[in-house]
Each structure stands twice: as C-alpha cells, then as structure tokens.
Amino acid sequence: MKRRIPAGLLLGALVAVGIAVGIAACGGSGSGKPTGSGSVRSLTGAGSTLVAPLVSEWTAPYQQQAGVEITYGAIGSGAGIESIVGRTVDFAASDAPLTASQATVCKGCLEIPWALSATLVAYNVKGVPSGLRFTGQVLAGIWTGRITTWSDPRIRKLNPGVKLPDTRIVPVHRTDGSGDTYAFTSYLSQSSAAFKSEIGSATSVSWPGGIGGNGNSGVGGVLASTNGSIAYMAIAYVFENNFDYGLVENAAGKFPTPGIRSIAAAAAMLTTVPTSGTSGISLVDPPASEPAAYPLATFSYVLVPTASTTAAGTALKRFISWAVTAGQRYGPDLDFAPLPAAVVSADQQILRKVR
Amino acid sequence: MTTSTPTPEVSGRDRNPFLARTKLADKLGERGLRICTFLAALLAVALVVWIVCKLVHSAWPAIDRFGLAFVVHRVWDPVTGQFGALPFLYGTALSSLLALLVATPVAIAIAIYLTELAPSFLRKPVAMLVELLAAIPSVILGLWGILVLGPFLGNHLEPFLKSFLGWLPLFSGTPSPYGMLNASIILTIMVLPIITSVTREVFQTTPVADKEGALALGATRWEMIKLVVLPQARPGLVGAVMLGLGRAIGEAIAVTQVIGNAAQIKASLFASGGTAAAQIASDFPSANPGVWQASLIYLAVILLVFSALANIAARLIVRHGTVR
C-alpha cells in the first residue's frame, strides 16, 4: 500500500515553515545596544580615514578604562557626515567642518575638534629624492593641469641642484568625500585665484583629469604604482608607507618639515577658539608671524548630536572628554600633534551642551 | 452458495481508508500550490515595480532640474551643483563595447573547440575551468587589475602600443596603470565565461543529423561549423552576448578600482574615465542629500532603462531569428 503525500500539501507546508523561521529569525535578532536607562557598552562611529589610526589606537585603552567598546568605520569624512545626519552611528569623524546645508540637515550636531594632524604632498618619481620644495601656486598649477612635467622650470626654480626628469606629472585625488581634499583645496584656493575659480574648495570637487583613489589607502595604492604621480595624503599614511613627500612653502616664505613641531606651531597661532560647537577652525595657511608653521595642518572634528536618541549621550561625553585629554598622549606616535590647551578647554565647554 | 461480490475495478485510493481521506488534501494541495506560486510571481513583479518607482521618485530633484539634457551634460561638479551623465555613459558604452568585441570571438572559439574539436577527455575539465572564471568575485578581479594587470599595462603593454600605434588617437596619451584599457580588459575577463557557457550550450543543441549530413556531403570540419552549427546558433549567440552586455554594464566594484574615476571624455584608451556604475559606487556613500544624491540616482535610472532596452532588443532578435 503506497502512501502518497500530495505534492501541493508538501509545498504548502514547506512555505509555511519557511515563513515561520523567517519571522522567528527577524524577531529574535535585536540591536546589541540597550536603550533607555542602563549602561551603554558600545559606541559606533564612522568617517574620516585621516583620524582612523588614532581612533583604533584609542579602542583598547578606553575599553580598559571605561568598559565601553568603540567601533569605528573609516569610510571617509563625507560618508561619516551622511551617517550622523541619518543617525545611523553615535558619532562621526570629519576633517572638514560641516557646511551650512549639512548643518541644517544634521539638525543640531556639534563639531568638536579632537585631533590635530596635517595633509602632506607625497610623490613617486623615479630618480627624485624626498624633500622637493613646492609653493601653493605650483601645486595649484599641477592639479589644474597647467604644469605637466616634472622638469617644468617653475619646479626647477624652487629646487636648484635637483635633477628632475621629463616624466609627466600624474596628479592623484580622492574620489570619496574627504577632509584631506577640503584642507588641500582650501590651501590651494588661498594660494591661487585660478584654482579657486576653476575648482573651489570642498570635501569633494571636480578635478580636471588625473587619477582618483578611494580613501587615503586607495590614493596610496595609485601613488605606489604610478611613476610620476603626486598626491595629497594624511601625514600618518605618508610616514607609515615611506612615501617621498614635499616641503610646502608657508606664508613666511619658509619650507617647514611636516611633523609634530610644525603642526603644533600652526595651532599655536590660534587667537580665539569658538565654543559654539557649530563652526570649524581653519589652520590652513597661517599668517607669516610664525615661520615654523606648517601650512597644511588641519583639525579633525568629531560630530555628535546635541541630543542622542539613545542613552549614548552620557557615554559619548565621557569618551570625547577622555579623547581630548588623556587620549591625546597616543597621538604623537601616529603623527598627531597634541591639542593646544585653549582648544581642549573650548571642547569641554562644548561638551556640556551634549545631553 | 457463496457469491463473492464482484470487486469493481477501483483505484487503491478508494480501497484504502487513509488514502480516501487525502482526496480533500489533494484539492487543498492543488489550491495551495497555485496560491504559493502566484504569490512568488507577484513578489517578483512587485519588486521590480517598487524598485523602479522608488528610483524615479528619489531621482526626481535631478530630473526636475536637468531634464533630459542631463544625458548630454559633460560636467560633474559637486561644488557648483552641475551634474551631467555624458562622461559616464560614454565610459560605460566604450568599456562594455570593447569587452564584448574581444570576448565574443574568443568565447565562440572556445565553444567551438569544446563542442567540436576537443578530445572528449579534455572537454569537461576545460569547460569547468572556464566556468571557474565566472566564479571569481569581482573584487578579487579588481585587486588583480591593480596589482598585476596595472603595472603590466603601465610599464610594458601601453608603451609598446604607443610606440607602434601611437599615431592612432586611441593609443595616444601617457601610459598609465589605471584607465579605460585596464577596465576594458577586466570586463572582458568577467564577460568571457558567461558568453562561453551559453554559446557552448547553444552549439550542443545543433541537430546531429544536420552535422553528419554536411560531413557526409564532403564538407570540412570548418565548413560544417560555418554552414550548420553557427547559423542555427545565431539567436542563442545574440542572447549570450546580451547576457554579457548586462554583466559588463552593471559591473561597479572591479571597474571603479582600476578605471581612475575621472569624469572626462578622452580619445585615448590610456586615460582615466568613469562608468555609470563605478561612479555611483564611488560617490554614493559621501554624496550629500539633495541634487548630488539625486543625480547619482538619475544615473542609475538611465542605467536601468538602458539595460531594459538591451534586454528587449535581445528578445526581439531571438524571436525574429527563431521564427522562420
């Protein structure tokens, strides 16, 4: 006697089981963070690749100190700003201050400078040593396509005694929204009216030609594999990968070596520090009164909502407060200069607004 | 006298009380099958409609501002809010076309070899290896493009092409590891296994009688392939090429890693460029909501329309080809 289960019944049963499992799986998985009262065990952040090495350096000591795990995604300043606007993360890191339109969309975000770094001009040309001198005008000329070979007289004039080959210059830029782009284009816009009108300054601009790379690491990859290329990159990436880098002229006419000292000199020029938490601080091209100031220093900001929807507000305050004080001692190893005292106290004042 | 009631010829179903009850279960099962499969089909259709509606709705700020002129604008500038699709559509068309131009003859050749000429012990392994190409994740191919193909192109192949064919605008310009040529080669590698496997299957459906007839009439191997196998495979070949085209148009990750991501139209294959999919992949995470984001979605809508048109064209050609 054969028992025959009708195929339709079997199919219907399978579908029903599948739906039940699906509902159970969806219902079972909740978010890892408890909301409301109770301690927050983890904070998520996203944004700038420039500050990523420092944030990852902070993770272990802060976990030990406060028991809170920091998860950070280095997706670029622009994407970080997007994330905090959408409140998909607790904090965002950006090397560029919020534009007016971004600030409106973010609805009550505070920008707090928490790291001090710099953008360098790195290059890869066979036969050319590190330490070439550049001015803002020359750099603007390279990236607008006016200076096309390494043996151009304008570069040679700045570097007598260096044998420059006829290789074509390949300018490299960032394809993602980047605070490095913001700092670099701000500097070039101040140095060259042509650059300002043709390209402008923002976290993402339209470059005439050249090659684009994604993130500091993508740009580093392009730089390493293309002879004759020149790029702007965060200082930590340049030093770590031993790229040749150039010396950029500052307002005093000097060519300071990029490093903690010259970055700190640029930050020491600050006379007033805003405490509103709604504006950035520009360190680009500081005035001539400090000859040792590096002209491409930049603050990196952490963006936090004034009122967090979850209980993360208190945890955020504690984390950022630690980051701008105790956390700064992890900076110099990664080529971040310590924040000037004026900025730290301003930060503490801004933090009081976070709920 | 015992008269045995004649047992009528009935199915086991009526005789077995358990099976008799399943008549109802049969009806329910039949109904259930119909409903479940209908829901699945409805889900697929609803998904397509929903995606298209959502895309157009999100792209509306850009459609409203630029209209159809978006397709011919050349500038992509987030600073001034000027966006145009032309460089990316050009890049998509050029890289896909080059990929298909190179991959199709090679795929046909591989398919002919595997179906007609290879010794039988070789067919399965080679076929499997070709299909393995399709299994390589696109990100891996992109990495290979950066680490292996890029330096080879920049240091050897492109200077070589430039020295011999540099008078052609296609091969003028500075040799570079990143650019349209690199992206086109990566796309060729991605598209090759798809076209090959579909073409191979189409060739295998050639009626054996036709092939043997041609050979019996004195045709050489090549004449047999040319006169019997290829003509009847034409509609299927078109379908295979269209499948490959679909893959080439939509490839974002591998292309954005090697193409240089520049919004420009240059004659030289060595120059960087961009494709629509690659631009969306690289810009979207950081695009500010507003015209920038809407323009990227508008680009996606154009891509969708283009793919749909290519699909429809393929079906029409196939149908026209099979109706004799």
Image (spheres, grey):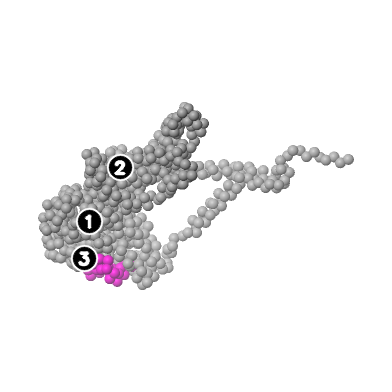
Of helix, strand and loop, which mostly describes the magenta segment? helix
Q: Please state if B192 lies on the left or on the right of A105 as rendered.
A: right
The image shows residue B63 at horizontal and vertical percentages of 32, 41
Residue linked to disc 1: A124
Q: Amino acid at mark 3?
A: Gly
How packed is label 3: few (under 14 Cα within 10 Å), some, or many (20 or more)?
many
Q: Earlier in the sequence, mark 1 or mark 3?
A: 1
Which circle marks residue A259 in the picture?
A: 3
Residue A102 location, quadrant: bottom left
Q: Amino acid at mark 1?
A: Asn
- Compare residues B247 and A64 and report the one nearer the observer: B247
Seen at 16% across and 50% down, the residue is A166
Residue B281 can be seen in this image = no
Residue A334 can be seen in this image = yes
Which circle marks residue A140 in the picture?
A: none
- Compare residues A228 and A22 and report the one nearer the observer: A228
Q: Chain of mark 1?
A: A
Magenta-tinted stretch? A319-347
Residue A160 location, quadrant: bottom left
Seen at 23% across and 70% down, the residue is A341
On screen, residue B147 above or below B106: below
Q: Secondary structure at mark 2?
A: helix
Q: Chain of mark 2?
A: B
Judged by depth in the image, the label closer to the viewer, 1 or 3, is 1
Residue linked to disc 2: B91
